[in-house]
Amino acid sequence: MSASSIFQKASGSRRTRDDSRALLEDDPLSIPLETINPSPHPAHRRPEIASRIREYTGSRRSRSCELVIYLAILAGLLLVILLPRRSPPAPTPVKVYEGLLPCGSSSYSINNHTCYQGSFLCPVIDRKRTLKCGNDCYLLHEFSCDNGKLVQVQTPDPSEKPPTQDTSPEPCSQFYEHLSDPPYENYFIYDCSGASQVVVTSPLVGSDLKIISPRLLIAWPAGNSGIVAYFSPVNRVNGTLGIGLEKSNKNRTLGPLVGGVTGLLTLNSSAILDLAILGSIRTIREFIEGPSSLSPKIQDAIKIQQLPDGGIQLNRQWLDKTTETFLTFHSLNQTPISIRDGRPRFKEGTYVFNAWSNYPQLDQFETEDIFASGTMIPQNSSDIHSLTFLSYKTKFLAGAWRFLTYFGRDSLISLLLLRPILSEGDGGAVEAILGAAVERINSKDGSVCHEETIGDYASILNEQQGIDSTDPLCDYKMIDTDFFLLIAINEYFVHSAIGKTRRDAFFTRSASVLPENRGLSYGNLVLATAEKVMRLTADFEQSPVRENLIHLNRGQTVGQWRDSGDGLGGGRIPYDVNTALVPAALRSIASLSNNAFFPSHHDWETASNKRAVVWEDKTLSFFQINITAERAQDLVKNYVDVSRFPGDVNFSDLNSPVVFHGLALDGKNHQPIVKVMNTDDCFRLFLLNSTDQTQLSAFLSQVADNILRPFPLGLSTAVGLVVSNPAYGEESVDIKEFTESAYHGTVVWSWQLVMMAAGLEKQLGRCEFEQLAFCTDTALHGRVVEAYNHLWDLIDANGEHLRSEVWSWVYRDGGFQYTPLGALPPAAGQSPVESDIRQLWSLAFLAVKRNDVYTRVSQIQDSGPLKR
C-alpha cells in the first residue's frame, strides 16, 4: 500500500539553524527477558561464524519463504551441535511484543530475524543483525558485499597485535535511564545488542503550540540514524492531545531490541500519525530546525502496511539498498489502527511500539574502560552512564539526540577538559578521540573534520553529486578544530607518561575511515595540519595588522563554536580563535617539534615559539572595548527598553568603566567590532599562560568584573553565566539576534561554565610557581578568587542542568528561572532550536571540581595570596 500521502506533510513553520548546527530512575535490569522463538545460536561464538552463515544461506533462493525459515532453523540446530556447548548468558530483562510480523508468506520474531524487501529473512547472530547480499546473509566484520556478491574481509596485518583469544562470554553493560526536561521526556537504554535514545514530546499547559507538538523520536548512534513520528488530535484542536510512555513493569518504560527499542506509547485521545521520517538523524534534525524540505524520493520509499492483528508497520529501505528502518505499533486495547487517506488513525489508549534498524552497531566502550586506572568511578551516576552512551572504540559522539556522531571540536575540547580521568594507551579513550580526528583530516590541506556525514545522509549527499556511494563525508568549514587537534596531541604525546610511549605506534598507524585517506599514516596527516597552521599564521608575525588575523573561510558565516547564523553577530574575525587558539596551537607545535615530531621542519621549535609570543601579546588589543561608566549606564538603559527586559536593574552598580573583548571583528554594515560581552575569555584562561604582566593583570580584572556583575550589566544570572550580553552593542549588533531563545544568545552553555572555572583555577594556581604581578596585588587577586567562588556557586546551584548542552531562562517571580531552550519561541527570523539533554563536553564536570582552597576571599584579603 502506498504511503506517500502521509509522509509528505511538511510544516511551513519549521525553519533551520545554520549548524553547518533530571531525573534518574535506577534500574538494575534484574527482570528476565521474555522473547519469542529464542535464537538457537549461542551468544558468543568462534570467528568462523560468518562463514557458516554464508554456508547455510548461500544456496537459498526466494522461491519459498517457508524454505528460508526451515533452512535457517536447521542451520542453527547444526551449529548448536557442532560448536562447543556453552550455557547462554542470563536472558536480558525486557518484555517485547509477543507476536510475529509478516515477511512475505512467512512470519518472524523481531529479535530473531530481519525482513528485507518484504520477503527475505536474515537471522540475528551473536546479538547482531546480519545483512542481505544477493541471496546471502552475512556479518559485517567477516564479509562485505560487492554487487550482490560476498567478499571476505581481509585478514589483519600480521605485524599487528593479534586479538586476545578469550572463550569466556563477553561482558555486557546494561543500562536504562529516564531524564525529564519538560516538555521533553528522554529515555536511554543500551545493552549488548545496541544503544537507543527515545524522546517523547508532549505539550504542557502554557506550551507554545507552534513549536511543541506531540512527537515520538528514536535516535541510534549506529549510523547516526533514527525515526520521528508526529501525531495530531483527531479533533484538530491543538493542545488537546497528550502522549507519553507507560511503564511495562515496576522498574522502567523501555526494553531493548536487537538494534532497536520497544515500549508502550499512551494517547489521551484519538490521534492521527501525520508525518514520519525514517533514516538519518541529520535529516530529522534539519527538518525540525528547518526550512528543510523532505525529499519525495526519501519519503515515498516509506512503506506502510496493516498487520494481521490490526497493528501497522512502517519501514523504509535506505539509499544503500541494504539498510532498513522499521517502526511498528500494536494496540493493547484490541482496537485496530485504521488507515484513512494514507494516514494511520489511533484511538485513545496504549500501543506497543517497536523500532529497529539493521545498520551495524558501534563497538561501545565498557564503562570501566573509559576511565584511567585508579579513577574513582561513582556508582549509578547519571554522568557516567551518559558518557558511556556517547563513547565508542572508534569515536566519541557529541550529544544526544541531535549530534549523535563525530564532531571534531566537541570531542577535542572534551578530551582537554576530561583528560585527567580518561584512559590512555592502546584501546583507551584518549586515543579513540585523537584517532577519530586524525582519521578525518583533509589530506590535501590539513583541515580537521568538524562533522562527519555517515549512513543514509552520506548516500543522500553523494547522490546529489551524481555518485552512487555510501562513503562517509566530512564538513571542513570550521576554522577552530585545526588548532584544537594540535593542542590535544601535544597534551597527550608530550605531557602524558603513557602518551610518550605510544608515539610511534600511534603515528605509524594507517588511516582507514575516509576512502581518500586510506593508507596514509597518522603522522603525515598531522603534519599536514601543522603545516597549515604555520602557513596561516606567518603573515601576522611579519605584520601584526587586523587584515592578517584569522578570518572565517570565504563564503561561510560560521567557523567556530558559535556556529549558528547569528552566533558571531555577523563578524568575520573571531575573538577566541585569534587571541587564544592560534597562540596555544603555535606553542604546541613548538613543543612537539622540540620532541622531534616534525623532523622535516627542524626550525619549528624556535620559529613557532617566537610566533606564539606575537599572537599572545598583540591580538587582544584589536578586540578590546572600554566604555565609561556613564556611557555604559545609558547603553544598558536603552537595552532594557528595547529588549523589554522584565527584571530589576541597579544601574548604580555601573560605577566604573566596563571593559570586555568583542565577539569578532569586521561585523555587519562595516562595523569594525561586534560589541557583545561574552564568555570566550575562558579559552585564553584555560589554554594560555600569558607572560605580559600588565596585559595579564588587566585581562583578569575585566574577566572578574564581568563574571561578578549581574546581567544585563554583566554575565551573571541565577541560572549561570550567559554566553552573550548585547547590552553594550550600540550600532554594531542587532540585539534581537541575541535573545534568551537564540542558540548563542543570552543563554547558558554548560561547557563554557566548566572551561571558565578550570581556566580561573589554572591562572590562580600559577601563583604557587611564578612571580606574577596579579598574585601580589591583594585587591586584584581577591577579586579573581571572588569571581571563581561566585562562578562555582552558580554551577552548584544549577547542578541538575549541567549535563545538558544549553539552557535558557524566563524571568518570573522576581528572578531568573531555568527553562529548556527548545520550549521558547525563536527570535524573529531565526529557527527553533532544541538542546541535547546530554552533551559530551558538558560531562567535563566529572573531571573539573571546585578547589576549596579558594572558597574564602577573606583569607586572601587578610593573609595575601593563598598557597595550596
Image (tube, rainbow, N blue to C red):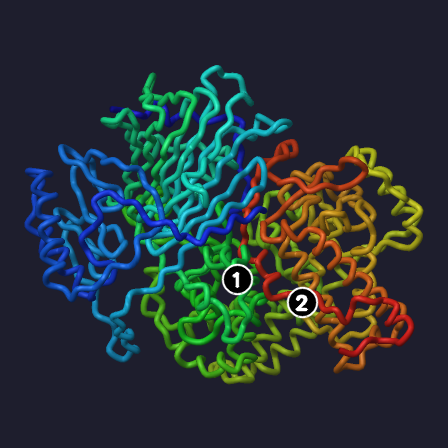
Q: Quadrant of residue 270?
A: top left
Nearer the observer, 701 or 162: 162
Q: Secondary structure at mark 2?
A: helix
Label 2 neighbour load within 10 Å: few <14, some 14-19, many 20+ = many
Q: Residue flagged by tag 1: what amino acid is it?
A: Gln
Nearer the observer, 1 or 238: 238
Callouts 1 and 2 close, C-beta under 8 Å: no
Residue occupied by mark 2: 686
Whole-percent x, y for residue 174 in the image: 40, 55
On the question of residue 251 being in view, the answer is: yes
Q: Residue flagged by tag 2: what amino acid is it?
A: Phe
Using the numbered discs, state the Cα–Cα distance from disc 1 to disc 2 in whole angstroms: 30 Å
Dot 1 or dot 2: first in sequence order is 1
- Residue at position x 54%, y 38% in the image: 184
Residue occupied by mark 1: 379
Whole-percent x, y for residue 400 in the image: 49, 48
Residue furthest to the top in view is 235
Q: Secondary structure at mark 1?
A: loop
On the question of residue 465 being in view, the answer is: no
Describe residue 365's horizontal placement relative to residue 34 as left or right: right
On the rendered image, what quadrant is the N terminus found in?
Answer: top left
- 523 shown above or below 216: below
- Residue at position x 52%, y 28% in the image: 213
- 184 shown above or below 51: above
Nearer the observer, 804 or 543: 804
- 568 shown above or below 107: below
On the rendered image, what quadrant is the C terminus found in?
Answer: bottom right
